[in-house]
Image: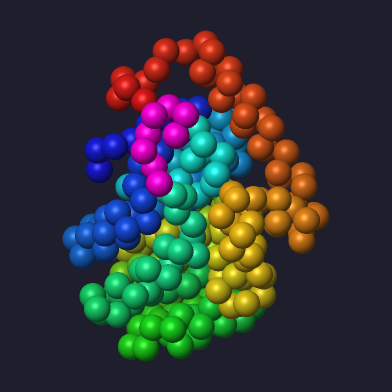
Amino acid sequence: MSRQLTILGCRLDLVDASEAVETIIALARRGNGAQIITLGTEMVVAARRDPSFLAVVNASSLNVCDTVGLLAVARLRGASLRERVTGVELIDALAARSVVEKFGIYLLGGAPDVASAAAAALQARYPGLRIAGTADGYFRLEEEARVLNDIRESGARIVLVGLGSPRQEFWLAQHSAELPGVVGIGIGGSFDVLSGRVARAPRAWRTLHLEWLYRLVTEPSRWRRQLALPTFVWLVIKEQLFSRPSAKGY
Ligand code: UDP
């Protein structure tokens, strides 16, 4: 992994969806364990405020660009990043490849029955896909050992973790030693989309990079979280004005 830049202290790997999938499959084949982060604007703002989260972000094996805010900054700095890489798209492509590679996939997260509904949808789309297991994301602390054990015993090579950010990133970082050989990917609310509980923005909105606005309109309770966007813009402008370009030349 060579092409990368740093935005507000967070490493962003400049990969498109197919490069991300190839990297993840290679990591899963190698079997040494890895953490993948679908990096978003809110996460970069959160990492700015929490050094322990920043450390988790920068220790991961791959940080893909999940939001238009990060994509815009990457492009402004001259990076030729074609598209953002969303959790849903990653899961879809990884499911297709996992059939061929014979990797089991475990889905952890979401309200009760959401992960299993997402798993069923994936299996319908990719016959032969091995779902190693599913569990909802509302387990109590005392149930955590059972969840970890279930994942280990499932033999999953890829574990999709949809506990919301930053919890899913902290969770994967904290438990990497207990999940040897596993590639863990934080995928936020992707199971809600895959299971059909939450609709993705219509294609036209996505093409116009307005998925965030669609989500704000359809889930107004998210407005507080989206306050991270103006904060992000302000911090990036400040960074641009007061610091020198990164060593990589972006
Ligand atoms: N979630 C969970 N356990 C929790 C809190 C949240 O499994 O204790 C799930 C929630 O059901 C949803 C996802 O985490 O599926 C968070 O989705 P959101 O869209 O908020 O995350 P984002 O993609 O923005 O990080």
Q: Residue at x 47, y 72 (%)?
A: 107
Q: Residue at x 51, y 70 (%)?
A: 108
Q: Is residue 121 left or right of residue 210?
A: left
Q: Is residue 190 left or right of residue 64?
A: right
Residue 207 in view: yes
Residue 84, image x, y percentages: 46, 50
Q: Residue at x 70, y 44 (%)?
A: 226
Q: Nearer the viewer, residue 11 or 93?
A: 93
Q: Name above or below for residue 213 compared with residue 249.
A: below
The picture quadrant where one finds residue 92 is bottom left
The picture quadrant where one finds residue 60 is top left
Residue 212, image x, y percentages: 66, 51
Q: Name above or below for residue 172 compared with residue 202.
A: above
Report the predominant secondary structure element of the magenta stretch: loop
Residue found at the very far left of the displayed protein: 30
**Residue 81 is inside the magenta segment:** yes
**Residue 135 is inside the magenta segment:** no
Q: Which segment is the magenta one? A: 74-82
Residue 55, image x, y percentages: 44, 36
Residue 146, image x, y percentages: 49, 73
Q: Name above or below for residue 134 compared with residue 32.
A: below
Q: Nearer the viewer, residue 35 or 64?
A: 64
Q: Is residue 201 left or right of residue 115?
A: right
Q: Residue at x 54, y 47 (%)?
A: 67
Residue 163 in view: no
Please state, as top left, top right, bottom left or bottom right, where the C terminus lies in the image: top left
